[in-house]
Amino acid sequence: MWDLFKPILVDFKNPVLFAIPFFLLLIFLEVYLNYRERKNNYLLKDSLASISMGLGSIVSDIISKSLAFIAFVWLFENFGIFKEQLSWTILGWVLLFFLDDFTFYWHHRLSHEVRILWAAHVNHHSSEQYNLSTALRQSWTEIFYKYIFFLWLPFLGFHPLMVLTQISINLIFQFWVHTKFIKKLPPFIEFIFNTPSHHRVHHASNPRYLDRNHAGTLIIWDRIFGTFSAEKDEEPVVYGITTNIDTYNPLKIASHEFTSMWKDIREAPKFSDRLKYIFYAPGWSHNGKSLTARQMRAALKQK
């Protein structure tokens, strides 16, 4: 096993690292457009907070990805079912593109629908601004469970290096959708792919838009599994979370929902309620003091 693990650890060239200069260039371009068109899409403190979160996530990712390497290699070496058919073949890359994106959809969706996972993911949504720097507001803790969702891919027989590369490519794609400057694209693109319009909906705090458009690259998964919502001209997106945290402190951004969850757990009257505060949807409460996204959408329909 270690004969395979060592070259992966040494030779893996993370595409995200090569993309960073382009990320910065696009951010500077968007800042310029923001200044030229007198928009109000950038707030310096907010962007610095997002960049700080991104830098912190790099450190966390080194640890979690190292553990993922070991698990991926072990599964691939000992249980890889279709190694010859899937590793480093054209068929393998095509299938991996779809299966990786399908996996990301469910990882992302559950990160919105399970409270403890949301506590890790929520900081990406905590900004009330929406621009390319928001894409850098990455979690420090989400990546410790993220790779668990992808374990089945090396088990099928996809080489670990292929899986890690495709995960990175998917992440790179998602950078450009964090902008207000690109409106709706041609219908066939909007129908198939995740776009800025679709992802603006995903970052909305409007009840109508909550927990919608979890796509990575392909929006088709949201259409298939009933979580798609189009951006409506009559309801502009309000960015942020349902209860905004009003801080630019990276430590508070990273930990605020864990703190809130712990407070709810301590106040729960029954052990079963304590478990529900951990594993039920964000917003669930034993006394109705807060509502889940599904309950909010249901209440909106009744109006």
Image: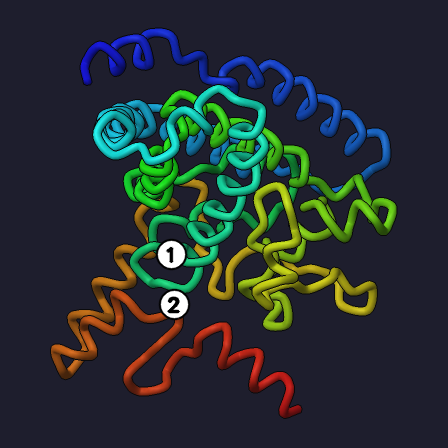
Q: In the rendered structure, are the residues bearing label 2 and label 1 in contact, judged by CB atoms less than 8 Å apart?
A: yes
Residue 208 is drawn in which quadrant?
A: bottom right
Residue 185 x, y percent position in the rendering: 84, 45
**According to the image, label 1 marks what residue?**
118
Q: What's the distance in space between the residues labelled 2 and 1, CA to CA? A: 7 Å
Identify the residue shown where x is 79% and y is 30%. 35
Identify the residue shown where x is 75% and y is 60%. 231
- Judged from this view, the residue extending furthest toward the bottom is 302
Identify the residue shown where x is 62% and y is 22%. 23
Q: Secondary structure at mark 2?
A: loop
Residue 251 appears in the rendering: no
Q: Residues within 10 Å of mark 2 (few under 14, many from 20)?
A: many
Q: Which label number is shown at residue 32?
A: none
**According to the image, label 2 marks what residue?**
282
On screen, residue 83 versus residue 72, left or right, reads right
Residue 117 x, y percent position in the rendering: 34, 54
Q: How many numbered marks appear?
A: 2
Residue 303 x, y percent position in the rendering: 66, 91
Amino acid on which the number 1 mark rests in the picture: Trp
On screen, residue 39 versus residue 41, left or right, reads right
With respect to residue 27, does 195 lie above or below?
below
Instruction: Tell which circle, 2 or 1, labels the residue nearer the N-terminal end.
Output: 1
